Amino acid sequence: MTNYTEGLAKFIAGIQYEDIPAAVIDRAKKLTIHCVGATLAAAPSPCVKAALSTARDTVGERAELMATTWGRPGKQPMNGAIFVNSTGADTLDWEDCSWTGHPTAGFVPVGMAVAEALGLPGKDYLTAIISGFEVYQRVSGHIQPDPDFDIVKNGWGLCSWQIWACSMPAGKLLGCDEEQFNLLMGATACETPVIDTIIHKQMSDFYHLQFGFTGMNGTMLARMAKRDELDNMYNIFDIEGGYAFMMQRGDNPGWLDRNLGTEYMFNEILFKHWPANMWIQTPLDCLDKLQKEHGFAAADIEAIDITPGFQFRDGYRPEGYNSVKDGQFSIPYCLSAFLLRGEPGPGWFDEGRLADADLLDLAGRIHLDKETVLPLKHCFNIFTGGSFPKVEMTITLKDGSVLKGELQFPKGHPRNPFDWDDCEKTFRIGAKVAGLSQEKTERFIALCRDLEHLDDVARLAECLSAD
C-alpha cells in the first residue's frame, strides 16, 4: 500500500516558519492584504448580507472563540465570522486563482479567524496558510479530470475540493499532530461537497456562499480532529475506495507527493487585477492598456473584437443579466462595466444595474471570435503549465479609427506579478467601500507588511472592525 496520506500529514504537522523561503512569505503577506481588500469591497453585496444573517441565526452572537467579521462592528463567534468572510472573499470574484480554484477564499479568512481567536502570532498564521495551501494544491491536483473528461457533461469540482484549503490551515493553527491530520484528511474527504453543475448552468450567486460553507465546515472538522473526536478514517489517499474513487474522476497520484517541502506551488497563484472571472483578466488588461494609450471613452466605441473566444465567457444578455455571477463570467459585461463604471468594486455588479440600458448597448458591440474558441479545460492546462492564453483585441471607433493590441500575461500572473502598491490599491478600495477609518486602513497595511513580526493576529484583525 502507498503512504501518501502519512506523507502529507507528516509534512503539514512538522513544517516550521523557518523552513519556508522568504519569497513565499512575502507572497503570502501580499495575498492576505489583497484578499482582505476584495472581501471588504463585497461588504454591501446581497450575498454577504445573506451570509451575515444566516451566521447570526445559526451560530448566534457569543461563543468560546470569537473573531472579527471584516467591515462589521465588534466580534462574532469564530465560525460565523469565517462563514461571512469566506463568502465575501469570493463574492466579487476578485481574490485569486490557483490552477484548481480559489483557495485564498478559504485559507485567508479561516487562517486569520483561527489565529485571532487563539491569540496566535503572525508567523503561525503565515506557516498555516502556506502549508495548508501546499496540501490543498496537491490534493486537488490528484483528483483532476483526465484529458478526455467532459467537464461540460460531468461538471468540475472547484467548490468541492475547496474544503481542503480550510481544514488544513485550521488544523495547523490548532496544533494537530500527524495522526490527527491523517484522520482530518479522511474527514475532509468525506465532507467534500458534491460536484454542483447546476450553479454554473443557472448562474446562481449561491456559488459564492459555498465558500462560506466550506470555510466553516473545514474549521469545524479541524477542531474535531484536535479534540480526538474522529476515528477510523485513516489513509484516505492510499486505501481501496479512497478519495479518487469517492470523487469519481481523475486519479493522479504523482501530485500527492510532488516535491513536497521543496516546491512551493504557492508562488504560482494568480492575483486578480479585476473583480471578474480569471479568463476575463487578460481582455480587461488589454482594454485598459489601449484606453490609456489612446484616451477613448465608451461613447467613442463602435465595436470591440477579441480573439480567441473563451468557452462560456461570451455571454451577452440583451434583456439583462440574471445575477452577479452571470455578469462576472461574461467578457462583454465586464468590459462594459469597466468602461462605464470606472473604479473596480461592487458598483460593477450593482443588482439594480444588471439590466442597465447603456451597459447592455455597449456589451452588444463586444464580440468574441466564434471560430477560434478555447475550451476551459485547455485554458487551465495552459495555466498549469506556467503560461496563459494570449488575447488579441481590435477596437473600432465611431470616427473610423482602428486600434489593435495584444496581451498574454495579465497583471497578477506569476510572470507579471503584483507588487505591494498593487495589493494596497485593492485593500484601499475595499476599506473605502466598507467604511474603515483612514487610521485603521493605514495600520492594517503597516501590520500586514510586517506580519511575520506581529505577536498577535488579533491586532491585525481589529483594524478590520467597522467603527
Image (tube, rainbow, N blue to C red):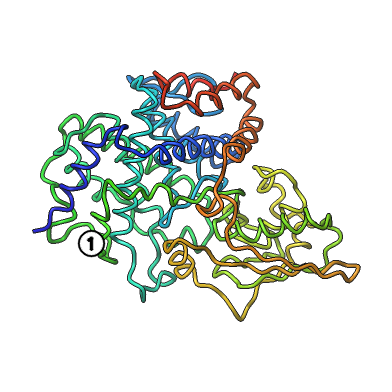
Q: At which x and y percent is residue 1?
A: 8, 59
Residue 14, quarter of picture: top left
The residue closer to the viewer here, 425 or 243, is 425
Q: At which x and y percent is residue 82?
A: 42, 33
Disc tally is 1
Residue under label 1, please give it: 253
Residue 455, quarter of picture: top left
Q: At which x and y percent is residue 462?
A: 50, 20
- Residue drawn at point x = 30 percent, y = 30 percent: 173
The residue closer to the viewer here, 252 or 385, is 385
Q: Is residue 231 left or right of residue 365?
A: left
Residue found farthest to the front: 22
The residue closer to the viewer here, 434 or 413, is 413
The residue closer to the viewer here, 161 or 120, is 120
- Residue drawn at point x = 46 percent, y = 19 percent: 459
Q: Is residue 237 above or below residue 439?
A: below
Q: Secondary structure at mark 1?
A: helix
Q: At which x and y percent is residue 300?
A: 86, 61
Q: Is residue 362 above or below residue 189?
A: below
- Residue drawn at point x = 62 percent, y = 18 percent: 439
Residue found farthest to the right: 399
Q: Is residue 405 left or right of residue 439?
A: right
Please name the amino acid that badge 1 sits on.
Answer: Pro
Q: Bin the neighbour count of mark 1 within 10 Å (Cα to Cα): few under 14, some 14-19, many 20 and up.
A: some
- Residue drawn at point x = 66 percent, y = 56 percent: 285
Q: Is residue 271 left or right of residue 454?
A: right
Residue found farthest to the bottom: 371
Image quadrant where one finds the C terminus: top right
